[in-house]
C-alpha cells in the first residue's frame, strides 16, 4: 500500500530511471535499511546533527538535494516531519539496475534511441559488477556471495572479488532477482578497457592523423629541453601491456638503469611486452635520449625511475584489468610511486551509441586519490571522436573520474607546432556534464622505444648508431601517447618543487598541486572547442615558472607570491566556510621573445569524494581590488556558481595592477566532511588568435 506524498513531491531521477512519488510512495521502511531523502536546500550543520540524532547515516549525494541514506528504523514519519525535508522514500530495487541493463526484449527493428536502453533477446548473458552499500560489513559480504551464487546459477569459484564488489557473468533475466537483496547498492555492466593508441595502416589513415613525425624530446618546451629538470628522484608507474623482454637489467637501451620494479598481473611471472604498447608509452615518459634516423628520440623525464605493471594476456582480450582496480594504484604507491600513467580505459560504447556514465569504477579511482592526496593519477581521454557523426561527447569511463588528470591528444599543424587536435581524440564533457579532458598534449606519430619482444613489426622504425643492432624505436598515435608526456611533466614539476623548496615544500606534496600547475600553465589553442582541448595544451615552461615560487599557505607561514605566478595549498573548509586572501600586484613577467604578459589566470583544483555528483562543492571567485568587480569560476554567474566541476578556472583579459582578492567558498560539504584545495595562478600572453 502506498502512502500519501507531500503536495510538493518531486520525481527522483537515478541511474536513468524515474520514480514518481505521486504514483508510489512508501508507507514505511520495513523491508529495507536504505532510503532516499530529498531536502529543500543544502544541509546546514545543525540539520545534519538532527538527522544523525534520528539515526540517519548519509551515504551519497545523488544530486538535486537528494541523498542516499542508511536508516535502520522502520518508521519514516519522524523524518517526514522535519521542516527542511521535502520527501522520504525507500531506495527501490529498480534503481539497482540501470536503464541500460533493463531486461526488456528489443524490437525487431531497433532505432538508435532504442539501442541505448535495451538489449536484444540474444544478448542473454552479460558480465556485471555487483556493488554493495558501503555499510555492509565483511560478514555480510561473505554471506552475500552464496546468495548471489544461488540466484545467478554461477558458482562462487567462477566469480571475481574486490572489497564490496562481485564480478560475474550472469543472464540478464536474473538481475531483478539479484537486486532484491538489500545489501546490494547497484549492478553495473563491466565495460572492457582498451588501449588508447592507433597506428595508420596506409597513407590515407596517416593523413587523418599527422604526416609529421614527433618525439617526446622534440615536443619539450625550449627552456627545459634537456636541462637540470629531468624527473630526478621521482618514481612513476605505467600500467600497460608490459615491459620489453620483462627483465630489470637486460632491457632496451632507452631504459638502462631506470627500472625500479616490474609487476606481472595478468600472466603469472611474465612482465614482458609482446604487444609493444607498454614499452612505447614508458619510453615517452622516461626513455633516455638518442640521436636516431628519425631525429632525437627520448622521454620527458629521463631521470625518473619506472615501475611497470603488465596486464597483457595472451588471449583475444589482449588487455585484462582485474576487478580490484584499486590494487593497480595501491601496490606501486606502496613502492613510492606518486605519479601513475594509464594509457587505457573504457571508451564510447559503439554498440549502444552512448557515452559511459560515471559508476563505481571511476568512483573507486576518485576514492583512492582522495585518500592518498600525494598521488597524481592520469588517464587518456580516448580515441573515439570519429565514432560519432553528430558531435556527441565521447570521453569514457575511467577518463571521466573526477580526481584524475585526463589527457587528450594534439597533432602538428603546417608550421610544425602541435596546435591542432588529433581528430580521434575523445571530446567532453562527461555524461554528468563535467569538463574533460583537462588538458591536451602531443600524441600523433610519436617515436618511442619498440619492445624487443614484439615478434614482427612492419611499420616505420628508427635506429641509432649509439644503440646495438636490432634496437629500434617506432611511431604510435593516440591519447595513449599524450598521457605519458604529461606524466613526465608532472615528474619534472614534482622535482622542481622538492629541489627549490625542500624546507618550505609540504610533505607529503599534494598531487592536486601538480594538476593545478599543469592546468593553469596550459595554452588555449585557437579555433579548438573547449570540450576538445579542456584547459589547453600543456606548457611545461609556464608550469615550472609557477613552481619556482614556494607554495603559500593560508596561515601565513609562507608569503603569497605575486600575480606573476605562484600557488597556494588551502586548509580544509567546512560547510559554508570561506577563505579570502589578496594576491599582491607585480610587474608582468616578460616572455622569452621580449613581449609582455597581458592576461591573468587562476585555477582551483581539489579531490572530491567518490560519487557521480560532486559531493563537496567549492567555488572560486576573484575581485579586482581596484574596481571591485567580482568574477566567478568557470564563466558562471555570481548567482549560479558551478556545481559540476572540481576544477574551476578564471581568466582575466588584463593584469590586475593593484592585486586581486581571491575567495574560495564551501558551497556544499558532505556530511561530517571537510574539503581542502590548491590554487595556481600566473600572468600570460595568449597564443595568436585566442580571444577570452
Image (spheres, grey):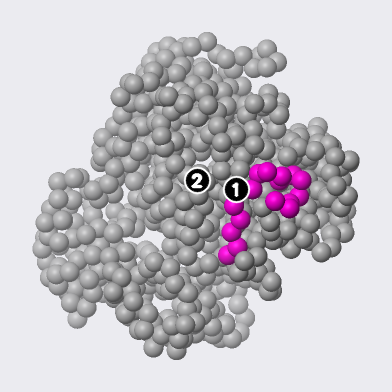
Going by the image, does 478 lie left or right of 491?
right
Q: In which quarter of the image is the N terminus?
A: bottom left
Q: Is residue 633 visible?
A: no
Q: Quadrant of the C terminus?
A: top right
Residue count near mark 2 (Cα–Cα under 10 Å), binned few <14, some 14–19, many ≥20: some
- Is residue 254 located in the magenta-colored stretch of the structure? yes
- Is residue 464 located in the magenta-colored stretch of the structure? no
Going 70% across and 33% down the picture, which residue do you hit?
220
Q: Can residue 543 be seen in this view?
A: yes
User: From what the image shows, is residue 426 above or below residue 222?
Assistant: below
Q: How many numbered dots are placed on residues in this image?
A: 2
Given residues 209 and 242, the one toward you in this image is 242
**Of marks 2 and 1, which one's residue comes earlier in the chain?**
1
Q: Are marks 2 and 1 in contact (CB under 8 Å)?
A: yes
Going 73% across and 51% down the picture, which residue do you hit?
251
Q: Where is residue 303 in the image (x, y as percent from the top left)?
A: 64, 37
**Which label number is shown at residue 336?**
2
User: From what the image shows, is residue 350 above or below residue 613?
Assistant: below
Q: Name the residue under label 1.
A: 260
Given residues 75 and 574, the one toward you in this image is 574
Residue span colored magenta: 249-265
Going 31% across and 64% down the picture, which residue do you hit?
134
Q: Position of residue 112 (x, y in %)?
A: 60, 70
Q: How far apart are marks 2 and 1 (CA)?
A: 10 Å
Amino acid at each position: 500500500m502506498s502512502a500519501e506524498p507531500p503536495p510538493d513531491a518531486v520525481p527522483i531521477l537515478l541511474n536513468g530511471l524515474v520514480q514518481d512519488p505521486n504514483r508510489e510512495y512508501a508507507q514505511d521502511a520495513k523491508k529495507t535499511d536504505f532510503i532516499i531523502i530529498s531536502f529543500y536546500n543544502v544541509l546546514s550543520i545543525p540539520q545534519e546533527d538532527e538527522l544523525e540524532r534520528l539515526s540517519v547515516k548519509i551515504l551519497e549525494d545523488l544530486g538535486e538535494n537528494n541523498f542516499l541514506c542508511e536508516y535502520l528504523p522502520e518508521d519514516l514519519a519522524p523524518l517526514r516531519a522535519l521542516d527542511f525535508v521535502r520527501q522520504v522514500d525507500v531506495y527501490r530495487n529498480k534503481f539497482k539496475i540501470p536503464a541500460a541493463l533493463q531486461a526488456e526484449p528489443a524490437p525487431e527493428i531497433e532505432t538508435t534511441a532504442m539501442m541505448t536502453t535495451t538489449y536484444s533477446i540474444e544478448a542473454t548473458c552479460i558480465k556485471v559488477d555487483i556493488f554493495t552499500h558501503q555499510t555492509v560489513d565483511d560478514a555480510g559480504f561473505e554471506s552475500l556471495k552464496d546468495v548471489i551464487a544461488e540466484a545467478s546459477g554461477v558458482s562462487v569459484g567462477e566469480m571475481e572479488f574486490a572489497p564490496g564488489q562481485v564480478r560475474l557473468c550472469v543472464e540478464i533475466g536474473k538481475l531483478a532477482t539479484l537486486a532484491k537483496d538489500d545489501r546490494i547498492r547497484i549492478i553495473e555492466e563491466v565495460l572492457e578497457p582498451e588501449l588508447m593508441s592507433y597506428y595508420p595502416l596506409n597513407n590515407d589513415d596517416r593523413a587523418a592523423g599527422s604526416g609529421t613525425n614527433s618525439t617526446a624530446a622534440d615536443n619539450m618546451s625550449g627552456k627545459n629541453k634537456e636541462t637540470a629538470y629531468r624527473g630526478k628522484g621521482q618514481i612513476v608507474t605505467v600500467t600497460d601491456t608490459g615491459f620489453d623482454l620483462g627483465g630489470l637489467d637486460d632491457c632496451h637501451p632507452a631504459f638502462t638503469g631506470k627500472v625500479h620494479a616490474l609487476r606481472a598481473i595478468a600472466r603469472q611471472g611474465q612482465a614482458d611486452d609482446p604487444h609493444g604498447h607498454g614499452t612505447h608509452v614508458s619510453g615517452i615518459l622516461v626513455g633516455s635520449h638518442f640521436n636516431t634516423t628519425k631525429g632525437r628520440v627520448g622521454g620527458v623525464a629521463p631521470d625518473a625511475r619506472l615501475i611497470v605493471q603488465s596486464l597483457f594476456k595472451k588471449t583475444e582480450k589482449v588487455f585484462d584489468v582485474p576487478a580490484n582496480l584499486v590494487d593497480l594504484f595501491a601496490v606501486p604507491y606502496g613502492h613510492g610511486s606518486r605519479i601513475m600513467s594509464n594509457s587505457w580505459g573504457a571508451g564510447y560504447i559503439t554498440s549502444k551509441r552512448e557515452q559511459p556514465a560515471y559508476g563505481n569504477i571511476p568512483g573507486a579511482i576518485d576514492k583512492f586519490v582522495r585518500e592518498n592526496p600525494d598521488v597524481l593519477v592520469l588517464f587518456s581521454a580516448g580515441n573515439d571522436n570519429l565514432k560519432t557523426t553528430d558531435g556527441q561527447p565521447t570521453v569514457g569511463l575511467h577518463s571521466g573520474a573526477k580526481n584524475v588528470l585526463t589527457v587528450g591528444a594534439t597533432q602538428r599543424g603546417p608550421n610544425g607546432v602541435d596546435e591542432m587536435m588529433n581528430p580521434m581524440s575523445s571530446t567532453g564533457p562527461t555524461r554528468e556534464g563535467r569538463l574533460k579532458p583537462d588538458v591536451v598534449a602531443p600524441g600523433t606519430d610519436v617515436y618511442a622505444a619498440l619492445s624487443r619482444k614484439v615478434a614482427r613489426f612492419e611499420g616505420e622504425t628508427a635506429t641509432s648508431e649509439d644503440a646495438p643492432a636490432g634496437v629500434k624505436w617506432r611511431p604510435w598515435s593516440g591519447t595513449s601517447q599524450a598521457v605519458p608526456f604529461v606524466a613526465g611533466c608532472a615528474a619534472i614539476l614534482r622535482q622542481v618543487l622538492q629541489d627549490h623548496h625542500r624546507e618550505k615544500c609540504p610533505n607529503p606534496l599534494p598531487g592536486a598541486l601538480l594538476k593545478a600547475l599543469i592546468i593553469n600553465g596550459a595554452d588555449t589553442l585557437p579555433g579548438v572547442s573547449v570540450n576538445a582541448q579542456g584547459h589547453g595544451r600543456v606548457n611545461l615552461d609556464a608550469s615550472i615558472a609557477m613552481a619556482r615560487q614556494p607554495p603559500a599557505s593560508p596561515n601565513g607561514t609562507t608569503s603569497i607570491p605575486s600575480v606573476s605566478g605562484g600557488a597556494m595549498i588551502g586548509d580544509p573548509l567546512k560547510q559554508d566556510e570561506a577563505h579570502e586572501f589578496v594576491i599582491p600586484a607585480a610587474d608582468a613577467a616578460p616572455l622569452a621573445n621580449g613581449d609582455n604578459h597581458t592576461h591573468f589566470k587562476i585555477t582551483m583544483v581539489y579531490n572530491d569524494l567518490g560519487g557521480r555528483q560532486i559531493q563537496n562543492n567549492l567555488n572560486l571567485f576573484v575581485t579586482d581590488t581596484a574596481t571591485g568587480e567580482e568574477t566567478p569560476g568557470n564563466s558562471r554567474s555570481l548567482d549560479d556558481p558551478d556545481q559540476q566541476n572540481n576544477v574551476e578556472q578564471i581568466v582575466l583579459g588584463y593584469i590586475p595592477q593593484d592585486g586581486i582578492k581571491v575567495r574560495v567558498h564551501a558551497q556544499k560539504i558532505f556530511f561530517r566532511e571537510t574539503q581542502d584545495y590548491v590554487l595556481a595562478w600566473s600572468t600570460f600572453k595568449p597564443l595568436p588568435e585566442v580571444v577570452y
